[in-house]
Amino acid sequence: MSALAELGYARLSEGEYFSEWCEENLQHSVDRFAGSPVVFEQWQRDFFDEALAADEFGTPYWSNVALVVSRKNGKTAMLAALALYRLLEDEGQPEILLAAASDKQAGRLFDAVVSYLRRAPHLDERVHRREYVGEIVNVETGGKIIRLPSSGETLDGFNPSLAICDELHAWTTPTRRRVWTSLNTGGAARQRTQVVTITTAGDALARETSILGRLIDGNERHGDVERPHEGLTVSRNHEGRTLLFNYSAPTTDPRDVDSMKLANPASWVSREFLAKQAANDELTDAEVLQLHGCVWAAGFEAWIDPVAWARCAEPGVSIPAGSRVSVGVDIGLKHDATAVVVAWPREDGRTVLQARVWTPRPGFEPSLLEIEAHIRGLADRYSVGAVCYDPKFFVRSAQELADELPMIEIAQNSSPMKEALQGFFSAVLEGALVHEGSGELTAHVLAATAERTDGGWKVSKLKQSRHIDACVAAVMALYGTQHLVSTPTSFFAFA
């Protein structure tokens, strides 16, 4: 990793001093490392050298710092050490928040800080530990480490100088999302707040919509990207002041231990350990890849292979006005989403898909009139030769549109739908589809599971909390490209 002087963006860094401070003051308390000083390895030093970069006034250069690394690589020890260092060494009245997806996870991080103090009486005498409420107070400055409850709605009442976010991949609840937004949009009162995250990778099904997935993809898309080796991507978004070290094994085979080792920089994570995890019958390949390789892997139940789907991505792709298209419509009320997908057979033989999704939420449900208006708007922009739809919840609307557009009813258990599902599956494998590469269409496609029966595919949700409506609409839209008609007709249907 380049030295800060070579990077040229910061005047100084506390990284070296922090590493020395940890070695002089902190001891491990777990397993074979118990009693030994906390000595960071070079990969950890490289991370902290940049994470603790500052300008000439000592203000942290990076507002948001994230390290994505596999389990068992010392994540908790690193975060706890940083929290304690900031409490005891920062001037003023530091306030350090320990935030996690659950109270149990936040408790582990808080307990790691307490363990450091118990093995360092000279540090422990400088603080007052209020373990029953999750606080550690610096008796000299009044600074605090605070274990943030997972039920906390916002940061009201807090004024953090440092927020430590553990296992960001699991921050999926509305409450955690609101906390993350508060931390990263000026919700905290201090101007010098730094947010530091260390996490494993998440589930591929949630990457497009998760906080962590968007953070990684956005930073690598908009920042300066460096690849020190195949298993590490460092992205630096100077405009957004976000630094991200992303370790990820360059493999989809958990038994490829050489590749898996690249996502496990810690010397104590051996190839033998990784091989043992890959052979563990209690873990699926997807779980091993995610937990020990930081690979965003979907389970085997996923209908569409994420790698094959990713190969169809073409960021920024669009459909020119006036193009001959088909439209797929899948309506969901109350709990399911509603999706309208446009399919355009491009001259190169590939079909471009673009989706619009309405997701219900408290106080909002999509209106059928709004959906009808959207479809009419598509007809104004494109030459619509087929509108394929699931009749559930849409019969009246289809009848309203039938005088204007060619409507094709496709019942979900019909032979045409089975044909459509097979056609979509084959098109993905053959690379015959084109999509934007991210967003709700991708999330819906990767959330679908399927069972191959004698009659063809039977598609459903991998998890009830996921939506697959855009996937269903895309299947019908692609099918519609085979049935484009030259002029609008009255309502007709496939049984």
Image (tube, rainbow, N blue to C red):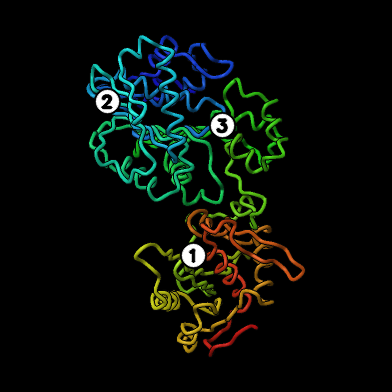
Circle 2 packing at 10 Å, graded few (<14), some (14-19), many (20+), is: many
Q: CA distance from mark 3 to mark 2?
A: 29 Å
Q: Residue at x 36, y 24 (%)?
A: 53
- Provide the secondary structure element on which disc 3 rests: loop
Based on the displayed image, in which of its 4 quarters is residue 130 positioned?
Answer: top left
The location of residue 358, given as percent across then percent down, is 43, 66
- Provide the secondary structure element on which disc 1 rests: strand
The location of residue 274, given as percent across then percent down, is 67, 30
Q: Amino acid at mark 3?
A: Arg
Q: CA distance from mark 2 to mark 1?
A: 46 Å
Q: Which residue is mark 2?
A: 94
Note whether 448 is above or below 130 in the view shown.
Answer: below
Note whether 227 is above or below 493 in the view shown.
Answer: above
Mark 3 or mark 2: which comes first in sequence? 3
Q: Amino acid at mark 2?
A: Pro
Cβ–Cβ below 8 Å for labels 3 and 2?
A: no
- In the picture, the quarter occupied by the C terminus is bottom right
Mark closer to the observer (2, 1)? 2
The location of residue 99, given as percent across then percent down, is 39, 36
Q: Which residue is mark 1?
A: 355
Q: Identify the mark at residue 71; answer none if there is no mark.
A: 3
- In the image as oriented, which residue stretches furthest toward the right? 454
Q: Nearer the viewer, residue 296 or 462?
A: 462
Q: Amino acid at mark 1?
A: Ala
Q: CA distance from mark 3 to mark 1?
A: 36 Å
